[in-house]
Amino acid sequence: MGAFIARQPNGLLCRWSTIVDNITHYNMTEDEYVEYRAEKAREDARWELKNNPRFIRPFSEILEKRDKDLVLQCLGAIENPEDYTAEKVEESKAEMVRLQSEFDALVETMSKED
């Protein structure tokens, strides 16, 4: 994105566009800036859903590309949440944290190789 945010002398924020080479928004509070970005994200998501035919893919592609046992387990949790005790939910959360940590470590290692 060809833009950056600057803090104005009055403490508020402005957005400088390198595309139009000018200020496009000014006197924004931090909350207004966050809302601006959130609205842009909503617009992008709506556009992708309506206009990008390759964005939404068939569910069968998930089954083909991923560990089927894991996918079926996720489907079970979605379709039958009452079957999962609080303990199972906590175990799943801990496993997600472990996997995220492992993933982050791999990304860091790969980044250092470049």
Image (cartoon, rainbow, N blue to C red):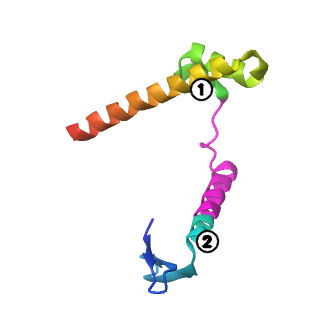
Predominant secondary structure in magenta? helix
Image coordinates for residue 67, horizontal then vertical, percent: 53, 17
Relative to 39, say whether 101 is above or below. Answer: above
Q: Position of residue 105 (x, y in %)?
A: 33, 32
Front in this rendered view, residue 32 or 65: 32
Residue type at numbered disc 1: Glu
Is residue 61 left or right of 46 when viewed as pictured? left
Seen from this angle, which residue lies furthest left? Answer: 113
Rendered location of residue 80, percent (x, y): 77, 19
Q: In terms of depth relative to the viewer, which is nearer, 74 or 96?
A: 96
| Image quarter hosting the C terminus | top left
Residue at horizontal 57%, vertical 75%? 29
Give the residue at x 45% y 25%.
Answer: 98
Most extreme residue toward the bottom, as rendered? 9
Residue interval drawn in magenta: 37-58
- Disc on res. 61: 1
First along the sequence among labels 1 and 2: 2
Pointer 2: what residue?
A: 32
As for residue 95 lying within the magenta part, the answer is no
What number is the disc on residue 22?
none
- Secondary structure under the numbered disc 1 in the rendered image: helix
Residue at point 33%, 31% (across, down): 106
Q: Is residue 80 above or below residue 10?
A: above
Q: Amino acid at mark 2?
A: Glu
Label 1 crowding class (10 Å Cα cut-off): few <14, some 14-19, many 20+?
few
From the viewer's perspective, tell me whether residue 5 is left or right of residue 92: left
Is 100 situated above or below 89?
below
Task: Please give the name of the residue rendered at 59% of the width and 26% of the height, measured from the top-left corner.
Answer: 61
Quadrant assignment, res 84? top right
- Residue ranking furthest to the top: 69
Question: Which mark is nearer the camera, 1 or 2?
Answer: 2
